[in-house]
Amino acid sequence: MNDSDTAPNRRLQFTAFLIVGIFLLGFVFASLGAWTGAVLGAWFVGTQKPWRGFWLLAGINLVLSLFSIWRAFEQAGVASAGWTLLAVLIGVVPFLLYRLASQRSPTFLSTLLLPLWGIVIQALSELLLPAAVINSHSLAHTQPAFLPLVRFDAILGTRATSFFIFWFAAAIVWMWNQEFRAQSIAVDASIFGLACLATIGYGVVLQTVHAALPEAPAANHAFVWICLAGALVLSLWNLASPDARPPVWANKTAALALLRSPYTGDTLKVESQDADESLVSTSGERFPILNGIPVFVQREKLTGSNEKYNRLYESIGGIYDDFQRVWLALHGLRRSQHFRGYLRWLEIKPGDRVLETSVGTGLNFQYLQPGARLFGLDLSAEMLANCQVNLRRWTLDADLVLGNAEELPFADESFDCVFHVGGINFFNDRAKAIREMIRVAKPGTRILIADETEKHVKDVYERVPVTSRYFKHRQEAVAAPIDLVPAEMREINLEILRDGSFYALTFRKPPR
């Protein structure tokens, strides 16, 4: 055993801590929090299903506003506290509308939906709420008066500051989702930067030439109507754009030929009814296809650790990628460094059929040899839904199925490469899952199994509030399943990576 990891990237680590520190300071200083809070709101609703994201974000904002609500109750009674509560809920509406209208076309142009709807909802709130409540929750009123951008309010009213705060948030989240790749964001980020510089520069000129420009109510109202028109046009255009249609399995003859019933081993065929597809076995079993993903498990039949940890992944599926990305950066690890650290053992050639069990959100796929035919299986529908989003973002194609790694719905000897990363530590039957990987692999295939060690589970999962209740009070410690690999396998090797936090177990299925 040895550690093949390289030293942490100190520059990346320093940048990560600096950015996290800025966001933490946003909870203390209102002028900074207006910007960082908007970024977090735009990011969070994008990781959740629209209405669930709305209510979760509203609940978070409510908790953060409890002091304001209590103070309003003490000073002016129940009515004032009620108005403050209503202001908190209304403040989340722009993020919901942005999420609903942009989900079909997540282009940079769609980032304008958040500031456009933000100004419209802000104007409506001014008609509904008392002035004192509006001022205490206005993004613009949190900014120091000496900022050049605020001087621009003299032309467009205080809404100009709110507009750019919302747009800044949406633009940053869009660039984050593009992983700040220069080739993906260069043009759009330049447009955004030039617009901000031009606005601030104009504000500097106004502040220099005119020391005290009055508010312009007419321009203020005109700006609201312009934003409403823009929001409606852009929303309708996005909603009318072609949705990402799920694949038609009746046309996937090559992939269909590999599928089998996980219970009987029977071959499967596609049956269509009213645009809905199902897979039907020769013995009459029926498996639905939902959003382009064949479903081979029923949630109510899950038991033990499979059911317990599936609930965890169903709840964190939307934020899984981003939290892993931040965690790696805080430890000075680039994502490519982390993934290629264990994927380097795989033997993949162009045209090979590659299966990843417990594929999750598909993060490994973007680091594999190009030209392979990709297949992914997972027990969590939420993780697979996010995997579909990632595949569209990376312009990759893969056939995904919802199934149990202990009962793979594939024919014997179907794949040139089979691997598993994350999850096997807490399977109901790890030995059976390993035997299934061996069964579907072609003779001579090298198989990879990788997961976190007991050290990582104790240091991270048991301490993070969201995951701690799933990992504390375990009866058994985590251990690499090298003792569960059948004795006839060849080239069995166990590597410990990342300072003892990760293991990679490889072995080769004997050739005929």
Image (cartoon, rainbow, N blue to C red):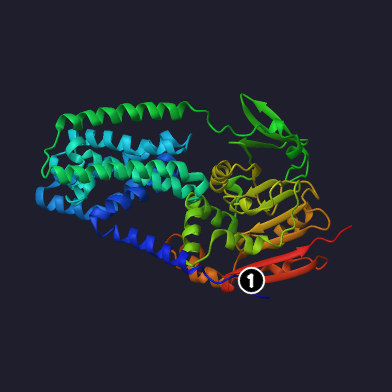
Number of marks: 1
Residue 148 image position (x, y, % from top left): 22, 47
Toward the bottom, the furthest residue is 1
Quarter of the image holding residue 292?
top right
Quarter of the image holding residue 67?
bottom left
Task: Please state, as top left, top right, bottom left or bottom right, where the N terminus lies in the image.
Answer: bottom right
Indicate left or right for 109 with 457 as reference: left
Indicate left or right for 254 with 478 as reference: right
Q: Residue at x 71, y 31 (%)?
A: 251
Disc 1: CA contacts within 10 A as few (<14), some (14-19) or many (>=20): few
Residue 226 image position (x, y, % from top left): 28, 28
Q: Is residue 431 above or below residue 113?
A: below
Q: Residue at x 78, y 41 (%)?
A: 266
Q: Nearer the viewer, residue 217 or 88?
A: 217
Q: Secondary structure at mark 1?
A: loop
Residue 386 in sight in this render: yes
Q: Nearer the viewer, residue 372 or 384?
A: 372
Indicate left or right for 227 with 498 as reference: left
Amino acid at circle 1: Ser
Quarter of the image holding residue 98?
top left
Q: Residue at x 39, y 44 (%)?
A: 171
